[in-house]
Image (cartoon, helix red, strand yellow):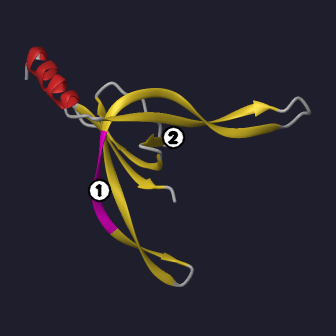
């Protein structure tokens, strides 16, 4: 695939990213007393698309609970770390996996809603 073809595919992907996505990272701030506090801070804002990917069952306590994972599609050059969370339409999503592919036209991140 030529670089022009790849760029055209990336442009087409980005046309289909209607949501504003806030990439958030847990940051430590000194409390001036020798300790620190932690808070999620937005480190980048980008466009994206979120879609329910699949359901799965988890055992929580002694009960089976269904959980839905989501695929969040971001521009190919977005920087997301495994420990980040995403905020989309006021909903928080925990990053579970980052799908890295060669010649990627977009970055796909598997997430779970934080209730």
The answer to which of marks 2 and 1 sits earlier in the sequence is 1
Q: Is residue 71 above or below residue 101?
A: below
Residue 46 left/right relative to 87: left
The answer to which image quadrant residue 14 occupies is top left
In the picture as drawn, the residue positioned furthest to the bottom comes out as: 62
On residue 84, the disc is 2
What residue is drawn where x is 25% and y is 32%? 106
Image position, residue 23 (x, y; %): 47, 34
Residue range in magenta is: 49-55
Quadrant including the N terminus: top left
Residue drawn at 27 percent across, 35 percent down: 18
Question: Does 43 lie within the magenta span?
Answer: no
Count the labels in the image. Answer: 2
Image: 64 above or below 78: below
- Give the residue number, with chain letter if any, for mark 1: 52
Q: Is 54 contained in the magenta span?
A: yes
């Amino acid at each position: 695939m030529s670089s022009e073809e790849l760029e055209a595919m990336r442009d087409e992907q980005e046309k289909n990213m209607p949501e504003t996505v806030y990439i958030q990272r847990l940051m430590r701030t000194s409390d001036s007393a020798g300790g620190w506090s932690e808070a999620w801070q937005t480190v980048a804002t980008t466009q994206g698309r979120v879609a329910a990917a699949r359901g799965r069952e988890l055992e929580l306590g002694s009960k089976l609970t269904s959980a839905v994972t989501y695929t969040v599609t971001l521009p190919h050059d977005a920087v997301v770390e495994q420990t980040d969370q995403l905020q989309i339409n006021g909903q928080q999503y925990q990053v579970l996996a980052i799908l890295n592919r060669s010649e990627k036209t977009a970055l796909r991140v598997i997430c779970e809603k934080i209730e």
